[in-house]
Image: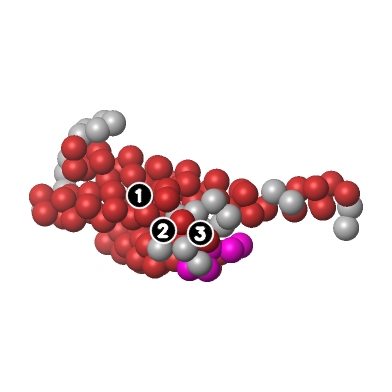
Amino acid sequence: MSRLAAFVRTFQPLMLSLLRIMVGLVLLQYGLSKLFGFPAAAPGGSAFPGQVVFSGVLETVAGVMLVLGFFTRPAAFIMAGYMAVAYFWIHQPRDFFPARNGGNLSILFCFCFLYLTTAGSGPLGLDRILGRGGKA
């Protein structure tokens, strides 16, 4: 292994925590937008107002859990499934290609959540402090 690869590898656990925190913050932003119109108003067009509230609560709660690294694996697993459902119910019927159906973010979220489901919270999370398998 080269020295560069060894040097970069030392940051891998920290980058896992950073990925988890950033994905959680982006998810939290979407949840807060749907519930409170902050930091921006949620886009309209949902068939059911209850669906927006449900999504907003789920995204807000899971976003906070991911930012804190608290029950990371269960939260990420639930959100991976939710993002897959969102893609196939909302985006995929519009068009086959994600670039044309607006589903890029749903796909990226889904696979980030799948990774976090398997990897855990990393060293900077409550899961590790509480002994819930937060290691990389």
- From the image, tell me which residue sits under label 2: 70
Residue count near mark 1 (Cα–Cα under 10 Å), binned few <14, some 14–19, many ≥20: some
Mark in front: 3 vs 2: 3
Q: With 123 as the anchor, is 6 left or right in this view? A: right
Asked where in the image residue 88 lies, by quadrant, the reply is bottom left
Residue type, label 1: Val
Mark 1–mark 3 CB contact (< 8 Å) = no
Dot 1 falls on a residue whose secondary structure is: helix
Residue type, label 3: Ile
**Residue 44 lies in magenta, yes or no?**
no
Mark in front: 1 vs 3: 3
Q: Residue at x 47, y 63 (%)?
A: 130
- Viewer-nearest residue: 131 or 73: 131
Mark 2–mark 1 CB contact (< 8 Å) = yes
Q: With 14 as the anchor, is 92 left or right in this view? A: left
Q: Residue at x 30, y 43 (%)?
A: 30
Residue 64 numbered tag: 1
Going from N to C along the chain, the mark reached first, 2 or 1, is 1
Give the alpha-carbon distance from disc 3 to disc 2, as whole Å. Answer: 10 Å
Dot 2 falls on a residue whose secondary structure is: loop
45 to 108, vertically: above or below: above
Residue type, label 2: Phe
Bounds of the magenta segment: 132-136
Residue count near mark 3 (Cα–Cα under 10 Å), binned few <14, some 14–19, many ≥20: some
- From the image, tell me which residue sits under label 3: 129
Give the alpha-carbon distance from disc 2 to disc 1, as whole Å. Answer: 8 Å
Residue 3 x %, y %: 88, 49
